[in-house]
Image (cartoon, rainbow, N blue to C red):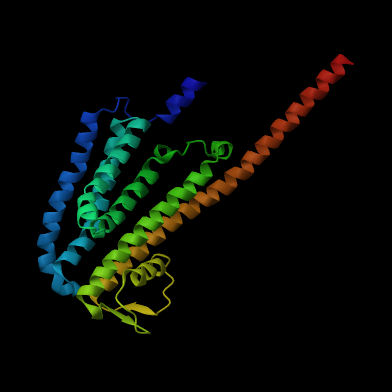
Amino acid sequence: MKKKEAARYTSGYGTGEITIKKLVFYNLLFFLPILAFIFLSRYLAGLLKSYFQTTAQITVQMLMIFFTLGLFFVIIPVIRKRENVLGVRYALIGFLIVAVGMTLPALVLRRDAGLLLLELPHIASYILLTFIYTPEVLGMDIDISKWFKHYKQILVILVYCSIVLLYITGFGWIYFNMAQVDPGAFSYSVNKPVEYPVYLYFSVISFATIGYGDITPVSTGARFLVCIEAMVGAIVNVIFIAILFVYISNFQAFIKELKKEETAIEKLTRKEKKKKS
């Protein structure tokens, strides 16, 4: 039984053991294309900045959200086919360590968290696509009924919250940068200072597609970025709402199976008592 379960758990995966050499290779597989995309984004930003009514730097930040999402969409399945569950998990952790580690010099030496905040939407995209492609890598068992025995549903909630917080924080920082270089990028129903918490709040209502109207995107770039965040928010929320419905339906099935097992045990107990009597 254990062999069958292990085979099912690793179905569709490679069987090679993860090594430092492989981790370096996988990180290069991510970061070399990202470096190429940065140069491409800078070229495109020179052409599009006037259309987006913002600076080339902020245009690059917006374009990189698309480029990295496309890159992860292609590379994560490649790693999944080459490695077992543990290998894919290590590749994910390795990428996160390197991505955050690259921002530490600015964070520690200059006390500038800007580079880290810009990384957050990309990290969120990586975690989201990993969850979509290989949920078992994040601790999700293929057999959803087992979630209830080990409280895996709590992990689903933690993954969802981490993705939401990463997206909201990262998008909020880009809004803040946009408002700094162009105060007319947003209109306000009341006078508000250009401070990060204001745009963090705006990022929350944009992600949730609430739109109170107290802050309104005016420039093309601001509207474009709000549309991106709203679409990302819709996708993330739909995925996890679907998981919630699956969770509820499987929980009901799990309870029914549990009741059947209890009934079967009671019948066996009665039979044994009758035999003894």
Nearest the camera: 95 or 10?
A: 95
Q: Quadrant of the C terminus?
A: top right
Look at the picture and state if 158 lies above or below 144.
below
Q: Count numbered badges in the picture.
A: 0
Where is residue 4? Give x, y as percent.
48, 23
* Residue found 28% across the figure and 69% down from its top: 175
Q: Residue furthest bottom?
A: 190
Nearest the camera: 183 or 113?
A: 113
* Residue found 69% across the figure and 31% down from its top: 261
Nearest the camera: 208 or 105?
A: 105
* Residue found 46% across the figure and 49% down from its top: 158
Q: Is residue 115 left or right of residue 252?
A: left
Look at the picture and state if 163 lies above or below 268.
below
Where is residue 178? Give x, y as percent.
24, 71
Q: Is residue 15 left or right of residue 244?
A: left
Where is residue 194? Give x, y as percent.
29, 75
Please identify the quarter of the rendering in which residue 173 is found.
bottom left
Q: Residue furthest right?
A: 277
Where is residue 264? Give x, y as percent.
73, 28
* Residue found 62% across the figure and 39% down from its top: 254
